[in-house]
Amino acid sequence: MVKEVAVLLAALGGAGNLAAVAEDAGGQRLKVVYDAAEGRVDVSENGIPVLRYNHGTTSVPEGIGSEYARGDYIHPLYGLDGEILTDDYPKDHAHHRGVNWSWATLQWRGETRDPFAVRGAWARPVDLRAKSDAESATIEAESVWKWDDKEPVVAETVVIRVFPADAQGRVIDFEIRLKALVEGIEFAGRLKEGYSGFNARMAPGDAQEIRLHADPEGASPRRAWGDYAAVFPGGKGRSGLAIFQCETNPQYPSEWREYPSLNFFQPAFPGGALIPMPKDETITLNYRVWIHRDAPDETALARQWDIYCGEP
């Protein structure tokens, strides 16, 4: 019988050092552990780590400036054999962090801030719920973007749902909801260049291969996926992850960006032009991450998109 434990914190940091564990007592074992002191949630399966979601601010490594401290992202993200797929605080771009959702341009009252580069606006934790059952482990985290780390301007909710691994890989779904709390907010990726949005900074590995795909307008279905594969330290061969855009996303499909020398790729929503974030209206973005061994061919990637967002 599945035992389910849910954690709800109305104000993180004020609840003491709590830990919640949720697991299936049968053959499939899912575990969710919340560490209030560190402000993070760890998910594992059958003793193998799956991911860590950092809701609170992470510790800055030696040699990196304290101004890069941040939270609200996933790292480490693990492959199916326990190898680490993502990177955090890399020396070449210290603001890069695992899998995250952040934007390079946030404009309000004629001024600009850059949450992506950790300049002038930060996502700060509010509430967190974590649970596990026989089908999945779910993290639902609420944060608020604070202008100059003082004034709340955007409410963010992210729902991360982790599924058990199967013969093909592991699915992790993300739903990101953004709602402006003030009038006049606009946001974008880096102006003109367009980068930032749903970001993946991968760990250094050998034999890197990045493949990006978006069907042309008029295609039915119109699929959009990107895949990153390499040989990561600690793995048993090639592995990686794919990102699938869902066609319900605004401006679908987002243009892909890749930076092979930085082990970095992303679907760049909304790109390099500002769009409004109307007060009290919700912008919802959905992505699926598929952790896999080897480097799946395009037929397998198309099939995974169909399972996620198209006709099964």
Image (tube, helix red, strand yellow):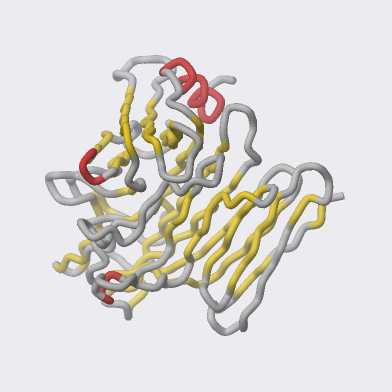
Horizontal arrangement in the rendering, residue 264 relative to residue 129 (left or right)? left
Instruction: Write the residue at 46% across / 32% down.
Output: 237
Q: Nearer the viewer, residue 253 or 46?
A: 46
Q: Is residue 218 left or right of residue 237?
A: left
The quadrant where residue 281 appears: bottom left
Residue nearest the viewer, comparing 278 with 155:
155
Q: Which residue is drawn at the image coordinates 43% and 34% (left, top)?
A: 242
Counting from the top left corner in percent of width and height, residue 214 is at 32, 24
Report the side of 93 relative to 286 (left or right): left
Q: Looking at the image, is 157 positioned above or below residue 77?
A: below
Q: Is residue 105 visible?
A: no
Residue 248 location (% of width, % of height): 44, 35
Q: At which x and y percent is residue 189?
A: 23, 50
Q: Residue at x 66, y 48 (%)?
A: 45
Report the residue that reaches farthest toward the right: 1
Q: Residue at x 23, y 60 (%)?
A: 91
Residue 16 located left or right of residue 200: right
Image quadrant where one finds the C terminus: top right
- State the count of labels: 0
Residue nearer the viewer, 213 or 50: 50
Query: Can you give x and y, in whole percent of width and height, for residue 308 in the image?
Result: 54, 30
Above or below, 168 against 116 in this view is: above
Report if residue 177 is visible in the image: yes
> Between 227 and 223, which is closer to the camera in this rendering?
227
Above or below 302: residue 45: below
